[in-house]
Image: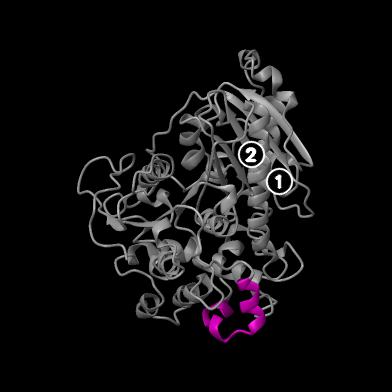
Amino acid sequence: MHVSRGVSFVAATMVAAALTWSPPAAAVSDEHCARQDRLRVPGAAFQQSVCLPDLTTAGLAGTPYTDMADQAGLTAKATRTPSGVPGVQIDGYFPDSSRFNATHGWQHDAQFVIRLPDRWNGGLVVTGAPGTRRQYATDTAISDRVLAQGYAYAATDKGNSGADFYRDGTRPGDAVAEWNARTTQLTRAAGRAVAQRYGHSPRRTYMTGISNGGYLTRWQLENHPELYDGGVDWEGALWTADGPNLLTSLPAAVARTTGSARDEDLYAVGFARGSEFLWPYHEKAYWGVTQKIYRAEFDPAYDPSCPGPSAGTTPEQVLAPCVSDAAYDYASRPESVHRAVARVALTGRVGRPLITLHGDLDALLPKAADSDVYARMVDASGRGRLHRYYTVEGGTHVDGLYDTHPDRLRPILPCYRSAFDTLVAWVERGTPPPADHAVSRPASGDVVDSCALADRATAAR
């Protein structure tokens, strides 16, 4: 649920870079580059392609082909990423009526990026932006490594972005419902673009994502298993019509910021004992804004004056909570609110192998009210054989907080990379993944770039 900030500055920077930067001449001499003008993304209203000497952030930082500011906080500073992956990048957008995404100066939503490495392994990885970020948000966390492994990569802004995303659509739930439709649309279109580039469709397609991207992964494997071979869900948001969902856990957190709730009230809705040292940061950066904008999406009638037509024009206004949300009681809200959530709700009926990761110190989407529940939903639907669930001890919602608390936290990214490799082995070689468990936090060693997924602590479920 990572809220993007500094949108206008980033947009201005990207436009300036687009006017002044061009790839080295050597990049356009490759045989593949000579055919890039033939690539067409089906359904795109606009697209532009470029052949680049390096599709990773090491090569793209400072160019208009990524956005390092929109990735802020998602990874630990010392994270090592691969580089030197030449290929073709296609940027564009599908037809859409909303205009929240200012990337490239397009002022157009439903933007996407597709990356096609010269050395292709036959696979495609698809993701959607976490939180309210945009299509380049997971370039460091996901794109760099899968490109280095030879996968084609596609990411979407989900059709709306920024703290005012709830204004998209005409009825409650429309904006979030569009996330799912845009991900399906991009998966189909990217598969066809891959076929144009390499001469045949992907042999394997994997869905994955962080936070809201993890929610998209769950939803896609439940509703469109025919498009994918499996997925990795990194702390996906849980939406259920009767709860739990973030509208049942965050009001207690907002109430704490106003002094009307005790620590015990947060424990009661799922926040973990031991995560208290993270609460002051979340009070300032996440709880208030997340509750108000998602409540505005599904229940705008609760308090029409807050956030109103905008979540705010300054960072302070955007991050500030609505005082009324401290008393929000999802269970007592009208049936129409529950129906709005039901439109995007998860069921647990996954149709392809899925691996879920969640940090035990997540202070935004506490696992007790999220992935623990989702794992039980999968089991109850009779799909438990398709699911593995690993709790990452010392993991929290954003890996960037490791830099502030290296003695208490560990980044989830290396465990995510291990989980992705485990999924591939499960799908392509039939290698059974480890049973559900909690991945122990080592007392020493490299936790920024290393994670032994098989290192067990206690049972996850």
Residue 232: percent from left, percent from top: 46, 50
Residue 212: percent from left, percent from top: 54, 57
The kind of secondary structure element at disc 2 is helix
- Taken as a whole, is the magenta stretch helix, strand or loop? helix
Q: CA distance from mark 2 to mark 1?
A: 26 Å
Front residue of 240/131: it is 240
Q: Residues within 10 Å of mark 2 (few under 14, many from 20)?
A: many
Front residue of 201/90: it is 201
Looking at numbered disc 1 in the image, what kind of residue is underneath it?
A: Ala
Magenta-colored span:
323-342
The kind of secondary structure element at disc 1 is loop
Residue 185: percent from left, percent from top: 68, 49
Q: In the rendering, which numbered label is found on residue 191?
A: 2
Looking at numbered disc 2 in the image, what kind of residue is underneath it?
A: Gly
Q: Is residue 384 visible?
A: yes
**Drawn side of residue 166 relative to residue 57, left or right:** right
Relative to 184, is 274 above or below?
Answer: below
Is 334 magenta? The answer is: yes
Is 43 magenta? The answer is: no
**Drawn side of residue 139 relative to residue 47, left or right:** left
Name the residue located 64 percent from the left edge and 39 percent from the top edge.
191
CB atoms at circles 2 and 1 under 8 Å apart? no
**What residue is disc 1 on?**
102
**Drawn side of residue 181 relative to residue 385, left or right:** right
Name the residue located 37 percent from the left edge and 62 percent from the top edge.
278
